[in-house]
Image: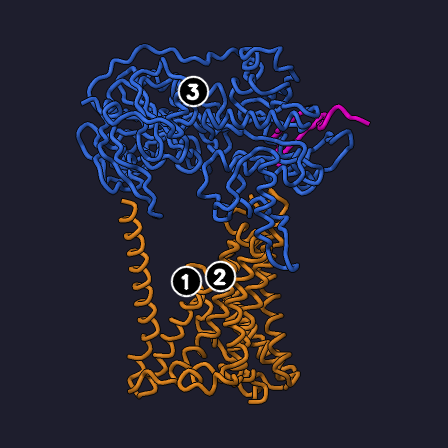
Chain colours: A blue, B orange
């Protein structure tokens, strides 16, 4: 009997104990040997649906069939036994173990019945790496290998456990253009060998390029299954958000003014002695957006940490309007009108159990505007909060709702509302739209452009190439803690060219890079 | 006063033994991501039941096994609270320590009142010389001058403790269980995603710690001191946590740290034996501890600086 479908999820409904309906009557079917996209905004129910398929959650009603056979997936082990493998968005790897050890975790080959057979683990890893053409270094520790290789390890981990059905949750979020291309070639290779792949992504371009069919979710419901070749990106985004989204942000040419942020020869060596920043110099002027592109882990995080006082550089200068920021705390830095949209919004952006209101005024709670004697002036606070919620279209029940209960996009809107509204001269936006829905992304991008055109300096760090290219007036690429390239104009740039600088294949000469200082 | 006598070095090893047991428990626990601050309480409870069982059965072997069993049971109970009922592990550990202090004296009075007709406040009268865990003279080594006097003639458990340092390293780095322990300690989600039962491994991890602490307790009441008495463990369970941290969480390094603490206590005893005012002697172990921690920290910093220079 040859069954056409590898996976059939029929009329799945998932209601959480607190009453949240994550999925309602969703059906998904995946053919053998196809790459199937699962699309939808944040909070559309993609992750929940996949968690049920991988045994991490149980459906409230509905049934799951694997190769035509009805199954009950009570745990990841049960899913693995049915030959389902998942590559999570956040890597499920143990950093201090080697690649081979991570590969065999939970199924360790033994010798003499008791001990780990390291040699066999390495052999097994190399055998699979060769078989599927996914090159990894079996003996390297996971913490020392690049992101692209980590992803391969994750895919190999699923394959070595016998997976025929692979779920990939936003696999390209952290990859360079070249690495993505490589991944796609490998996925196509797997598809030809009869593997089924469920591909979750926000990136329309990739979906169009690699998938055969797609299922679109909106608000926990399925908007239907489509042949990729028969829909346009516009149709997809309409199905996802229920309206046409203008993905291109219109912006006038920048009229850069005087220098706001001045960074010169900034170097930083981290606690493990690794040089994370190596003589980085840059300037951001009034009214311009300077983008920083690069593979994660090439010094962007450290640069932001220095700029916002989370750690101290070993040498170098950081100045905002001529005043040094080095050695200042976050409050003092904020008093110089520097705003930060942090990369990790849940950790640094908000206090998730506090209310929207409390989060919105957290950076200005001491200001005379909101205080009367020893007490808060609640009327003024309510008024300001209501206004910010309206201006930034935060979708919520009321201002006293816990921020943590909002969707990702709305949480980010709360962060942005606070950071953009305190009269900044410099905004540091670190991955401002990562993992949030198209609607909120568009809103935040427009807002950034609008603010920069009103004369604010913006430093934009993003792993999303489209985003940096779209928004930035000029752009630098970081690689290995150094600036590898500076482009005065982003119009002519291609993914291909940027990828070469991001991976360190090419590098501009120091004079070209020095132009970013505008001296 | 002559400090560097063979007796002095002998006493370092003797004093370090119970700390070493608890240190190994802390090392395995921390590798598995479990901060077990209840080791002190477990040692107290094991010490009590070990000595009582030895008395009843007239056998130190039974006493030792019961102490290990009690340690295991108490650790698993901690596991039920911490991993199943999701209580904060630090609170569970604090509770275990309080029971180890107040609960033991309560139990010893009730038990001895019911079995012997009089409520004892310690079991020191019950543990006679023949119930002591035996000392072992090591052939050949005992005949080496100086070294023999230091290394030979310790309790069976002392040799076991040092053997366990090596066994712990083998367990952690050479066996699948050790790999699982290290992975759940670092990224439990990763382990769970490949079908490793995080809860099972956690129970095994804390259970091994309980058995080790139980041996430490048995050593206290059936060798080091003859019989159980109130608060006899006197902070060794906590010192073990410090030793684990000072040793960088690795078995060998933590063993060296445990020996440093043993040295500090031995020094205190040695000095007080010379008749110096006890108020002056009492702080010695703590002063030594602070000094060694400072040396440790300076050393770490120098290492970092060297790495920094190498990087520049």
The magenta stretch spans residue B172: no
Magenta stretch in the rendered image: A1-26
Q: Residue at x 60, y 11 (%)?
A: A231
Reading the image, the residue beneath label 1 is B247
| Label 2 and label 3 in one chain | no
Q: Is mark 2 on a helix, strand or loop?
A: helix
Nearer to me, A309 or B308: B308
In the depicted structure, whether residue A295 falls above or below residue B168: above
Q: Position of residue A516 (x, y in %)?
A: 25, 23
Q: Where is residue B300 in the image (x, y as percent from the top left)?
A: 32, 57
Reading the image, the residue beneath label 2 is B27
Between marks 2 and 3 in the image, the one whose residue lies nearer the viewer: 3
- Judging from the image, mark 1 belongs to the subunit labelled B
- Badge 2 crowding class, 10 Å Cα cut-off, few under 14, some 14 to 19, many 20 or more, is many
Q: Which residue is drawn at 43% across and 12% down?
A: A248
Name the quadrant containing residue B127: bottom right
Name the quadrant containing residue B302: bottom left
Nearer to me, A119 or A425: A119
Q: Residue A495 carries which label?
A: 3
Nearer to me, B227 or B149: B149
Q: The N terminus of chain A appears in which quarter of the rendering?
A: top right
Spatial CA span between label 1 and label 2: 9 Å
Name the quadrant containing residue A53: top right
Q: Where is residue B250 in the image (x, y as percent from the top left)?
A: 45, 60
Left or right position of B32 against A392: right
Nearer to me, B130 or A35: A35
Spatial CA span between label 3 and label 1: 49 Å
Q: Main secondary structure of the magenta part?
A: strand
Q: What element carries label 1?
A: loop
In the depicted structure, whether residue A253 falls above or below residue B140: above
In the depicted structure, whether residue A107 falls above or below residue A202: below
Instruction: List the single residue furthest toward the right.
Output: A1
């Amino acid at each position: 009997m040859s069954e056409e479908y590898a996976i059939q999820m029929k009329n799945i409904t998932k209601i959480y104990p607190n009453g949240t309906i994550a999925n309602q009557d969703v059906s998904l079917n995946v053919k053998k040997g196809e790459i199937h996209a699962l699309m939808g905004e944040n909070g559309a129910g993609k992750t929940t649906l996949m968690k049920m398929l991988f045994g991490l959650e149980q459906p409230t009603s509905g049934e799951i069939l694997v190769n035509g056979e009805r199954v009950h997936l009570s745990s990841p082990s049960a899913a693995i036994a049915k030959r389902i493998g998942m590559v999570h968005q956040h890597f499920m790897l143990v950093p201090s173990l080697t690649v081979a050890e991570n590969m065999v975790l939970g199924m360790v080959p033994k010798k003499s019945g008791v001990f780990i057979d390291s040699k066999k683990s390495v052999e097994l890893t190399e055998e699979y790496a060769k078989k599927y053409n996914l090159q990894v270094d079996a003996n390297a520790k996971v913490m020392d290998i690049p992101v692209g290789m980590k992803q391969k390890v994750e895919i190999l981990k699923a394959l070595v456990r016998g997976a025929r059905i692979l779920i990939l949750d936003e696999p390209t979020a952290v990859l360079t253009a070249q690495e993505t291309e490589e991944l796609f070639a490998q996925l196509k290779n797997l598809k030809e060998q009869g593997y089924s792949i469920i591909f979750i992504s926000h990136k329309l371009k990739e979906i169009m390029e690699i998938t055969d069919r797609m299922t679109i979710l909106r608000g926990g419901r399925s908007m239907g299954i489509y042949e990729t070749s028969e829909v346009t990106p516009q149709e997809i985004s309409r199905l996802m958000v229920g309206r046409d989204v203008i993905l291109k942000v219109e912006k006038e040419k920048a009229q850069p003014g005087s220098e706001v942020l001045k960074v010169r020869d900034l170097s930083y060596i981290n606690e493990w002695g690794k040089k994370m920043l190596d003589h980085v110099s840059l300037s951001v002027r009034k009214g311009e957006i300077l983008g920083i592109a690069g593979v994660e882990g090439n010094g962007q995080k450290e640069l932001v940490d220095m700029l916002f006082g989370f750690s101290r550089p070993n040498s170098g200068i950081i100045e905002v309007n001529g005043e040094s920021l080095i050695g200042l705390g976050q409050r003092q830095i904020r008093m110089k009108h520097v705003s930060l949209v942090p990369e990790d919004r849940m950790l640094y952006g908000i206090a998730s159990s506090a209310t929207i209101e409390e989060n919105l005024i957290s950076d200005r709670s001491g200001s005379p505007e909101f205080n009367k004697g020893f007490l808060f002036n609640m009327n003024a606070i309510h008024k300001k909060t209501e206004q910010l919620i309206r201006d930034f279209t935060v979708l919520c029940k009321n201002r006293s709702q816990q921020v943590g209960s909002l969707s990702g996009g709305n949480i980010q809107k709360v962060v942005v509302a606070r950071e953009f509204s305190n009269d900044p001269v410099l905004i540091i936006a670190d991955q401002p739209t990562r993992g949030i829905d198209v609607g909120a992304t568009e809103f935040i991008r427009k807002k950034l452009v609008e603010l920069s055109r009103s004369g604010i300096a913006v430093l934009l760090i993003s792993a999303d190439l489209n985003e940096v290219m779209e928004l930035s007036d000029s752009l630098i690429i970081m690689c290995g803690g150094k600036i590898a390239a500076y482009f005065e104009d982003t119009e002519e740039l291609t993914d291909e060219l940027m990828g070469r600088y991001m991976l360190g294949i090419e590098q501009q000469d120091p004079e070209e890079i020095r132009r970013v200082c505008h001296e | 006063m002559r400090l560097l006598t063979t007796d002095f070095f002998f006493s370092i090893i003797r004093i370090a033994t119970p700390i070493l047991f608890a240190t190994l428990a802390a090392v395995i626990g921390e590798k598995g991501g479990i901060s077990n601050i209840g080791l002190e309480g477990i040692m107290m409870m094991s010490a009590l039941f070990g000595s009582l069982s030895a008395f009843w059965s007239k056998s130190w072997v039974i006493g030792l096994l019961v102490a290990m069993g009690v340690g295991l049971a108490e650790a698993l109970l901690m596991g039920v609270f911490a991993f199943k009922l999701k209580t904060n592990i630090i609170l569970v550990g604090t509770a275990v320590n309080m029971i180890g202090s107040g609960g033991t004296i309560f139990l010893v009075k009730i038990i001895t009142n019911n079995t012997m007709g009089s409520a004892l406040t310690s079991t020191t009268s019950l543990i006679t010389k023949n119930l002591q865990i035996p000392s072992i003279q090591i052939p050949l080594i005992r005949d080496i001058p100086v070294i023999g006097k230091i290394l030979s003639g310790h309790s069976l458990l002392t040799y076991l403790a040092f053997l366990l340092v090596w066994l712990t390293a083998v367990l952690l780095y050479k066996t699948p269980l050790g790999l699982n322990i290290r992975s759940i300690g670092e990224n439990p989600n990763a382990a769970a995603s490949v079908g490793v039962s995080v809860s099972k491994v956690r129970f095994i991890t804390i259970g091994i710690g309980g058995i080790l602490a139980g041996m430490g307790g048995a050593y206290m009441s059936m060798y080091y001191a003859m019989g159980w008495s109130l608060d006899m463990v006197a902070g060794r369970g906590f010192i073990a946590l410090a030793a684990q941290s000072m040793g960088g969480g690795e078995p060998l390094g933590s063993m060296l740290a445990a020996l440093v603490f043993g040295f500090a206590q031995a020094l205190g005893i040695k000095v007080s034996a010379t008749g110096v005012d006890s108020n002056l002697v009492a702080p010695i172990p703590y002063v030594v501890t602070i000094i060694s921690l400072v040396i440790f920290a300076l050393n770490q910093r120098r290492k970092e600086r060297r790495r920094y220079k190498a990087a520049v």
